[in-house]
Amino acid sequence: MVFSGAEIRNSLAGVWQIFKGNPQGLRGFDLSIAGFWRSFLIVVPLMIPYLLVSKAQLQIAISEFPGAENLELQAFYWVEAGRLLLDWVAFPVVLAVLARPLGLTRHYVGFIVVRNWSELLAAIPLLAAALLYGIGVVGLDGFTFVSLVATGIALYLRFRVARVALEASVSFALGIVIFDMALSTVISLGFSRLVSLG
């Protein structure tokens, strides 16, 4: 088993404490090099909510935009999985290059560990939005609203993680979040272009 039950409980509890602004939440994580590499495997369970959200977005596109139903579903899901994997590693790689010039070397490993674990918590509201839309509880407007709220929660969580794990100022933490979001947007647009070309 890659993650023990205790590690999962402690890490998620740590994320929740950091979300509330409590730096003691860092004690819940394995901040070793082994814990660093292991935290990247969190992308595996993240695939499920990510693809469910992608499915909901595809259903909306099919209902709202003529021609969207012609998308090859298998190719669409492969592209979405590829987008998640690239997005998952791109920011840590870029930040590793920038860590020394930005003075983040001492906090880099811990920050990435916490960031990776925090994505599990951040995925819950988005998963809820996709499920509610999928079973017909909410329509397009409801899905859009819940998704916006979920995205706001995720961005706030990333801000708290940067503040605590990097011991960063408000402005620096905001800069990290904006850069992370911008990089994800570039990757998303690139893969969307790939789907449209397909």
Image (cartoon, helix red, strand yellow):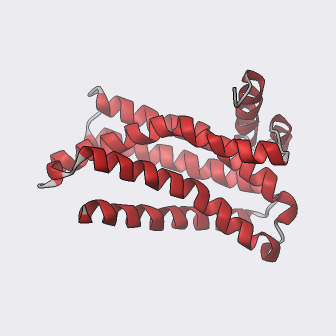
Q: In which quarter of the image is the C terminus?
A: bottom left
What is the number of callouts on the image? 0
User: Nearest the camera: 94 or 23?
Assistant: 94
Tell which residue pokes out farthest to the bottom in this image.
101
User: Nearest the camera: 146 or 35?
Assistant: 35
- Residue 38 vs 197, above or below: the answer is above
User: Nearest the camera: 42 or 180?
Assistant: 42
Q: In which quarter of the image is the N terminus?
A: top right
- Residue 51 vs 191, above or below: the answer is above
Residue depicted at x 86% and y 38%: 27
Tell which residue pokes out farthest to the top in this image.
5
Residue depicted at x 38% and y 37%: 52
Does 11 sit left or right of 31 as displayed? left
Q: Can residue 65 be seen in this view?
A: no
Can you tell which quarter of the image residue 91 is in?
Answer: bottom right
Does 189 sit left or right of 122 as displayed? left
Residue depicted at x 70% and y 31%: 2
Residue 124: give x, y in percent of width and height. Answer: 52, 34
Residue 78: give x, y in percent of width and height. Answer: 37, 48
Does 58 sit left or right of 8 as displayed? left
Does 81 sit left or right of 137 as displayed? right
Residue 102: give x, y in percent of width and height. Answer: 79, 73
Residue 14: give x, y in percent of width and height. Answer: 76, 36
- Residue 51 vs 173, above or below: the answer is above
